[in-house]
Image (spheres, grey):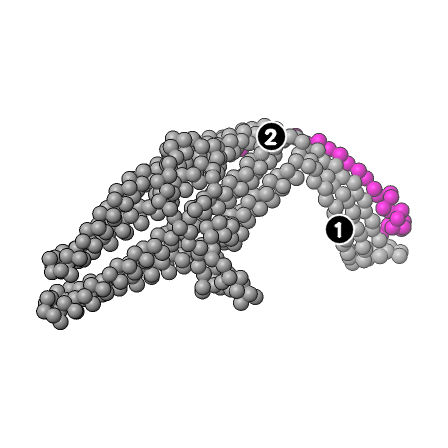
Amino acid sequence: MALACMGVHAQKQWTLKDCIDYAMQNNITLKQAVLKKQSATEDRKQSKAALLPSLTATTNQSLGYSPWMEGVNVKKGSYSGTYGINAQWTVWNGGQNTNALKQNTLAEEQAELSAQETANSIQERIAQLYVQILYMNEAIEVNRQSLEASKKNEERGKTMLEVGKMSKADLAQLTAQRATDEYNLVAAQSNLADYKLSLKQLLEITDDPTFDIAMPTASDEQALAAIPALQGVYEQALLTRPEIKNQELAITKSELQIKSAKGGYMPTVSVTGGVGTSTSSRNDNSWGSQMKTNFDATVGLGVSVPLIDGRKNKTAVNKAKIQREQALLSQQDARKELYTTIEGFWLDAQSNQQKFRAAKVSVESEQQSYDLLSEQFQLGLKNIVELMNGKTNLLQAQQNKLQSKYTTILNIQLLKFYQGEEINL
């Protein structure tokens, strides 16, 4: 089975949508959140059933022995049995049962929203890892090109050393530059493998050593796309994000808890009823005759009025009010955290988009400068330090461009995600 799964995984390169869809079905944290929702559903069903009468059937069979009984034909041993059906229904208890049902219904909705929160968090993390992999993939190519340039410079340096146009010290610097670029390439490849491993773990994939993702080409236009307005994203998120809805339900639930606690001051009215009969071996009548003769039925109405409860109800009401204040504070905190998160995405998108525009110009300028330096170096017009500085500046500009490009794309997508759109690269 594991080999079959490995084969299926190995046959494809995972798109972002593939990763998200797979995680929604297989992520363990999300599955646990779904189970909590199912547990909340059971609590809601139980509280609904508590509104109905309860019905129980009872029987008791016993053996007796009376060793000192005297008389003719007296049986010292006996056998008796009782049989009954009893019903009980709480007609009114200050609305505690109905409020409990409403609270558990809200708890079920909250559990569903919590599962959605978990799903959203997983989707965000997948998008972050996916974009990081795309970035590292291009960064590896940049490092590879830089290494190729370093190798050519080193070979050129060896030729120049042979004809006496370069010292051994200068050649050693070129060799060191080539070794540094090799290290940078290996480090970038290692980082890429780590990001892929993190993504696999998030998807709960353990049987596919060849796991790889599709590498869509991220265009400059995506990084230069219009950035959603901060306030617009926040206002839309307030209407759609599950963490905000969850806090609103928590406030409603706390208000029901206050009503339920106040119900403890109210009388409890209950109706009881039952039918029963009994038999005994000491009775000369037949078993059927005893069942009929001893049959009885009862019905009763009970009222319980709390008088002194050791401050139990007052404490319950006060604690419910405190819980409501906590829910209100939690709602404020959730709104603040939501705004802070969105503002962070928006600021990152704004700043990195500006950096990207500047980095594009910088890369073109540094590329032209390095090409000119390389020509001048071959002609002996520039020294080794100037050439290496030019190459370092070009590499840094290329890395800055890639980083700002993918950071901008990611944050624009996350802003759209908080508006209710799907993440799409």
The quadrant where residue 47 appears: top right
Q: Is residue 146 rendered to the left or right of residue 384? A: right
Name the residue carrying label 2: 95
Q: Nearer the viewer, residue 260 or 267?
A: 260
Name the residue carrying label 1: 60
Q: Is mark 2 on a helix, strand or loop?
A: loop
**Where is residue 139 shown, x and y percent of the image?**
32, 55
Label 2 vs 1, first from the N-terminus: 1
Q: Please, which residue is most extreme toward the bottom here? A: 162
Q: Residue at x 30, y 56 (%)?
A: 142
Closer to us: mark 2 or mark 1?
A: 2
**Where is residue 146 shown, x and y percent of the image?**
26, 59
Q: The N terminus lies in which quarter of the figure?
A: bottom right
Q: In this view, does 342 lie above or below 153?
A: above
* Amino acid of disc 1: Asn
Can residue 315 be seen at all in this image of the molecule? Answer: no
Q: Which residue is drawn at 64% across and 38% down?
A: 48
Q: Write the start and end of the magenta stretch as one range.
A: 282-311
Q: Residue at x 16, y 66 (%)?
A: 157
Q: Residue at x 61, y 34 (%)?
A: 97
Q: Is mark 1 on a helix, strand or loop?
A: strand
Q: Nearer the viewer, residue 394 or 96?
A: 394
Q: Does the magenta stretch include residue 287?
A: yes
Q: Nearer the viewer, residue 39 or 230?
A: 230
Label 2 neighbour load within 10 Å: few <14, some 14-19, many 20+: some
**Where is residue 387 shown, x and y percent of the image?**
16, 57
